[in-house]
């Protein structure tokens, strides 16, 4: 179930975090404005025998939601697949929304897939997301006069090549090669992990 953890506050910041945590159609300027980041900086290196991941992901895998199906969504939610509708959209060869929702409802499974022009660019964008999350949470705490009891980010082990939960918008962000997965908030993190695991494995085999 899509459920923001910071209701109504700093909406523009939340949207900014969601955008910066995903890849985009922006041309790859890594070589001009960012230091070169070797793929070996990933938590599980592409091509590592244990990880099973290998470099660039083809566009067809993005359009196919990394092999994630409506049956997968139903299994994770514990309901019949007949109760769900596939509302997925392919925005471009580099961006898609995979969405499997109950009829007439926003309850379900949703995640964004976005492609960067290189693995190095994707690594840099994941790192940028870490910085934005920290700034956004600090800004929201100041605006509300409160202090968050949770860290801005929580590392998520054994998912893709690197992954973290982002407290400010409740998403799970995963990188597989040059692709970023952003799993939208659900009832609990374990459900989100299951989604991320299936999609990550699907992309790594493409």
Image: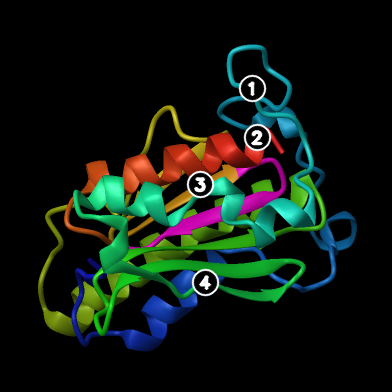
- Does the segment drawn in magenta span residue 181? yes
- Does the segment drawn in magenta span residue 31? no
How far across and how far down the image is residue 175, in percent? 58, 45
Labels 3 and 1: the sequence-earlier one: 1
Residue furthest front in the image: 82
Is 129 positioned to the left or the right of 105 in the image?
right
Residue drawn where x is 14% and y is 81% of the image: 144
> Which type of secondary structure does the marked residue at label 3 adopt?
strand
Labels 3 and 2: the sequence-earlier one: 3
Label 1 close to label 2 by CB (< 8 Å)? yes
Which disc is residue 36 wearing? none
Crowd band around label 1 with a 10 angstrom C-alpha radius: few (<14), some (14–19), many (20+): some
- The stretch of residues the image draws in magenta is 176-184
Residue drawn where x is 24% and y is 41% of the image: 190
Q: Looking at the magenta stretch, what is its main secondary structure?
A: strand
Label 3 close to label 1 by CB (< 8 Å)? no
Labels 4 and 3: the sequence-earlier one: 4
Q: Which residue is mark 4?
A: 88
Q: Which residue is mark 2?
A: 204
Q: Nearer the viewer, residue 105 or 21?
A: 105
- Gap in Å between the C-alphas at discs 3 and 2? 12 Å
Q: Which residue is mark 1?
A: 52
User: On the rendered image, what quadrant is the N terminus found in?
Assistant: bottom left
> Which type of secondary structure does the marked residue at label 4 adopt?
loop
Whether residue 171 is visible: yes
Crowd band around label 2 with a 10 angstrom C-alpha radius: few (<14), some (14–19), many (20+): many
């Amino acid at each position: 179930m899509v459920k923001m953890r910071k209701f109504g506050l700093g909406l523009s910041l939340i949207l900014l975090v969601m955008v910066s945590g995903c890849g985009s159609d922006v041309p790859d300027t890594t070589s001009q404005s960012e230091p070169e980041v070797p793929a070996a900086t990933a938590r599980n290196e592409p091509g590592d025998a244990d990880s099973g991941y290998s470099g660039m992901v083809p566009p067809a895998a993005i359009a196919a939601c990394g092999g994630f199906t409506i049956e997968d969504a139903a299994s994770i939610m514990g309901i019949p697949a007949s109760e769900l509708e596939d509302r997925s959209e392919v925005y471009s060869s580099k961006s898609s929304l995979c969405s499997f929702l109950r009829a007439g409802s926003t309850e379900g499974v949703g995640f964004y897939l976005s492609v960067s022009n290189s693995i190095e660019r994707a690594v840099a964008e994941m790192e940028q997301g870490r910085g934005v999350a920290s700034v956004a949470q600090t800004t929201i705490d100041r605006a509300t006069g409160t202090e968050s009891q949770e860290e801005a980010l929580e590392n998520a082990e054994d998912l893709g090549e690197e992954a973290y939960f982002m407290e400010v918008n409740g998403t799970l962000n995963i990188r597989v090669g040059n692709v970023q997965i952003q799993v939208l908030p659900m009832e609990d993190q374990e459900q989100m992990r299951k989604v991320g695991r299936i999609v990550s494995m699907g992309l790594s085999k493409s």
